[in-house]
Amino acid sequence: MNLKKIFLPVLLAIGMMIGFAGCGDGTSSESIPEPVVETVTDKVYDGFGTFTGTTVDGKPTEGKLVTDEYTYEGTFEDGFKLTGTGKLTYKGEDAGWSEGTFVNGLMDGYGQVYYTGGYHGIGQWKNGKLQGTAFFVWPQGEGAYDWYYGNWENQQRVGEDGYYQFNNGCYYYGEFAGDWINGEGTFHWVGGNFWTGTFEGGSPKKGTYGYGQMDGVQGYIAVDAETGAWSWYNGTLEDGTEVVNGQPAEAE
């Protein structure tokens, strides 16, 4: 019997096991300390405020922070950075609240705000400013409000398909630029009159024409280049149609 053939594979296997055992898992042989998780109540942190909640290695991760300027309830990162989901309630003259997703204390993501006096916004935010689709309400006296739903960029109303509702019953649907009604759209007045065309600064653009209703009659309406007054349009449409007193002329 060839003992070498029998024991050599066994010895090799044992040697490999010993070698792998000596290699370990590639980490340091020193033990990594477990994080210290604590629950604290009304603990004062100099320069930050009073905290109640959970800490990891002495740093807040979730709970309530009370300062002279605000109260925040939610999650934290890297100590006292208001980052994650939570609600921030302000004190003093700026009383109001913000609730949603925060990054370093600023709304960033989906959330809503409410300010003293009735200002209220809900939607998408970036670096503390409205960015994306959002709804916002402006108080206009006791019990009266204007509101807007549409796109925002850097806290300004911009883009197509915006809707603005006035507290007096008028409303507009269309383009916004420079934080106001500018571009193509339709404005409806109380009483039934409307105008579809190009707007500038919230009014039908002077020197243009559009389609609408005036005194209960619909047709093409011209806007005076000097005064902005309305009159029935007389001229040729872009498609070549002749218009007389606001109505397409009958073909001969």
Image (spheres, helix red, strand yellow):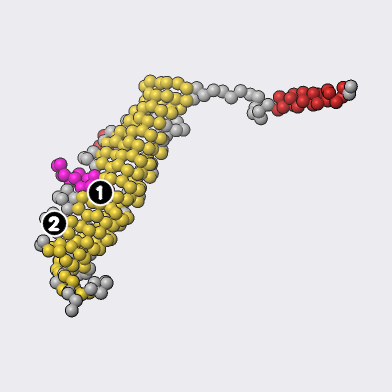
Please identify the quarter of the rendering in which residue 216 is found.
bottom left
Q: Is residue 179 visible?
A: no
User: What quarter of the picture does the C terminus occupy?
Assistant: bottom left
Amino acid type, mark 1: Tyr
Magenta-tinted stretch: 137-149
Q: Main secondary structure of the magenta part?
A: strand
* Label 1 vs 2, first from the N-terminus: 1
Task: Tell me the number on the disc at residue 148.
Answer: 1
Point 23% across, 63% down: residue = 197
Point 45% across, 21% down: residue = 38
Q: Is residue 11 part of the magenta span, yes or no?
A: no
Query: Which residue in the rendered view is the most extreme toward the left?
Result: 215
What residue is disc 2 on? Answer: 192
Query: Which residue in the rendered view is the most extreme toward the front?
Result: 1
User: What quarter of the picture does the N terminus occupy?
Assistant: top right
Describe the element under mark 2 as helix, strand or loop: loop
